Image: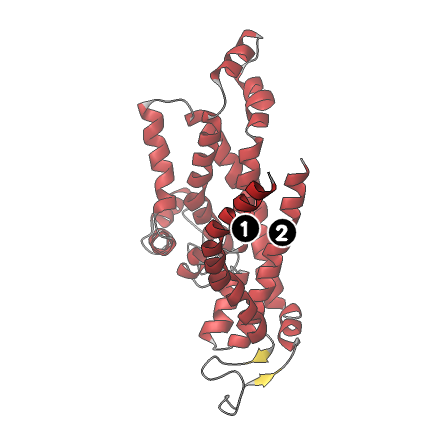
Amino acid sequence: MINKNKQNFWIAMAFLIVPLIIFSFFVVLPVFKAAVYGLFKWNGLGPLTGPNAGRKTQFVGFGNFKEILTDPIFWKAFSHNVKIIVLSLLIELPIALILALILSSKSKTNVALRTVFFIPYVVSEVIAGTVWQFIYNPQYGISTTFIANLFPEGTNFAFLGNPDTVFNAIFIVVIWKYFGLYMILYIAGLQGISDDIREAAAIDGANPLQLNWYIIIPLLLPTIVVTLFFCIVGSLQTFDIIWAMGKGDPVNSAETMVTYLYKFGFKRLQMGFGSAIAIVIFFICVTFNAVYQRLTTKK
C-alpha cells in the first residue's frame, strides 16, 4: 500500500510539474519582479541597477507604496472599483438570475434569447466600448435621440464628457457586456436540478414564486457563490471598456485601479510606481480570494 501511494504521488507530480513551471514563469516570476521594480523610481528604459542604470533610477524602498496610499486619485479609483462591485451584486447578478429562471426551459425561443443575451460577452471589450461611444455621441447617438424626445429642453447629452454621468453611463455598458455570462452559468446550474424536485413541489401546492424562492434558488447556491467570485474579481480588474470609452476621464470620474496603473506605468513611463500599483492590486485580489476560500470551504 505504501509503495502504491508513493507511486501515485510521483505520477501526480509528473503531471503537475509542467503546469507548475508554466505557472511559476507566467505568474510567480512576474509578481516577484513587479515587487522588486516597485522599490525603485524607474522609467523602464534602461537597466534597473548597475553602472548603466539611468540617471533618474534610484532606490526608494517603500516610497512608491506610501505615495500610492496617500494619493487621493488612487482612493477615488479604488472607490469606483468598490462601486462597480456593489452595483454588480445588486443589479447585474439579479438581472442575470431572473432571466436564467425565465429562460431555463428548453424551447426554440428561449435558446434564441439566450444567444442574443450572450452575444455581448463574446464581443471584444474594445469593440463594445467603441460602439457605445457612438451610441452615447451627443450629436447623433441613439441615446441622444431617444432622450431628446423625452426631455426636449435642459438636458446635457454629453454623458461621457460629464463628470456627473460618465461613470453611470459606462456601468450600463458593463451590465450589458457581462450579464449574459452569469445568465448562462445560472442556466447551467438550473439544468442540473432534477425535474422531480419541481414536480414534487408542484404536487405539494407550491406556486412558481415559492418554488423558485424556497427550492430552486437554494439549490442554485453553489453556482451563485461562483458567480459572486467571478463578479468581484472581474470588477477589481475592470479596464478595457473604461479605457475604450474615455480612459477614466474627465477629471478621473471613471478611473479604476487598473486605468490608474496604466496611466502611470505606461503612459507616463513610471514603471517603478506602476509596478507598486500592480502589487497593491494583487494584494487586494489575493486578500479577497483568501477570505472567499475561507468562507466557502467552511461550509
Nearer the observer, 266 or 47: 47
Contact, mark 1 vs mark 2 (Cβ under 8 Å): yes
First in sequence, mark 1 or 2: give its number.
1
> Visible in this render: residue 158?
no
Which residue corresponds to the image point at 48% horizontal and 27% vertical from the top-left?
Answer: 190
Amino acid on which disc 2 is placed: Phe
Horizontal arrangement in the rendering, residue 25 relative to residue 121 (left or right): right
Residue sitting nearer the eye, 291 or 138: 291
Query: How far apart, in angstroms, are the residues tagged by discs 1 and 2?
Result: 8 Å
- Quarter of the rendering containing residue 216: top right
Q: Position of residue 185 (x, y in %)?
A: 46, 35
Classify 10 Å Cα crowding around label 2: few (below 14), some (14-19), many (20 and above): some
- Vertical comparison of 115 with 258: above or below: above
Q: Who's the residue at 54% across and 40% down the image?
A: 226
Report the number of numbered marks.
2
- Helix, strand or loop at disc 1? helix
Is 59 on the left-hand or right-hand side of 111?
Answer: right
Provide the secondary structure element on which disc 2 rests: helix
Q: Residues within 10 Å of mark 1 (few under 14, many from 20)?
A: some
**x and y, in percent, of residue 199 in the image:** 50, 11
Q: Which residue is mark 1?
A: 233
Foreground: 68 or 283?
283
Q: Which residue is mark 2?
A: 288
Which quadrant would the N terminus be assigned to in this image? Answer: top right
- Indicate whether 273 appears above or below 21: below
- Look at 43% across and 58% down and name the residue there: 240
Check disc 1 and give the amino acid type.
Answer: Val
Q: What residue is drawn where x is 55% and y is 18%?
A: 211
Q: Percent position (x, y) of residue 215?
A: 58, 21
